[in-house]
Image: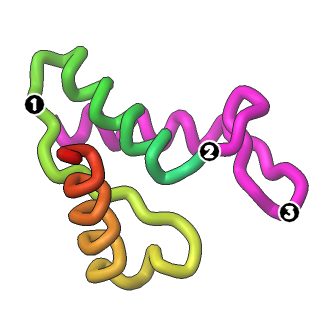
């Protein structure tokens, strides 16, 4: 299932354009890590899979998995309140 999500993410990244401030735009909207993660998770769900603990990190924190895991953990805590 991971391949399904990654294929969709790669397609989104291929069609994204570089906008002002060197930000990626997808359909003229900023492409955030959260948006790309939702694309991956939705593709997996549509293929009858279950996405769990998907990590997408762009920018400077992308090379440090700890940052991505900590950010995801903080997001989960915020959603439960």
Which mark is first along the chain, 3 or 2?
Answer: 3
Q: Is residue 11 magenta?
A: yes
- Residue at 38% in and 44% down: 37
Tag 1's secondary structure? loop
Element under label 2?
loop
Sequence order check, earlier mark of 1 and 2: 2
The residue carrying pointer 3 sits among few (fewer than 14), some (14 to 19) or many (20 or more) residues within 10 Å by Cα, namely few
The part of the chain drawn in magenta is: 1-30
Q: Nearer the viewer, residue 50 or 4?
A: 50
- Disc 1 marks which residue? 50
Q: Which residue is mark 2?
A: 31
The residue beneath circle 3 is 21
Q: Nearer the viewer, residue 66 or 46?
A: 66
Question: What residue sits 72% from the left and 27% below the top?
Answer: 27
Q: Is residue 23 above or below residue 27?
A: below
Q: In 3D space, how far apart are the residues under numbered discs 1 and 2 (Cα atoms)?
A: 23 Å
Task: Locate residue 61, reporting x and y percent.
Answer: 47, 78
Sooner in the amino-acid sequence: mark 1 or mark 3: 3
């Amino acid at each position: 299932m991971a391949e399904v999500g990654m294929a969709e993410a790669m397609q989104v990244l291929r069609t994204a354009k570089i906008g002002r401030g060197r930000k990626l735009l997808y359909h003229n909207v900023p492409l955030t890590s959260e948006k790309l993660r939702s694309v991956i998770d939705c593709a997996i769900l549509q293929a009858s899979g279950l996405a769990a603990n998907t990590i997408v990190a762009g920018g400077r924190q992308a090379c440090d998995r700890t940052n991505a895991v900590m950010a995801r953990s903080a997001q989960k805590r915020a959603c439960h309140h």
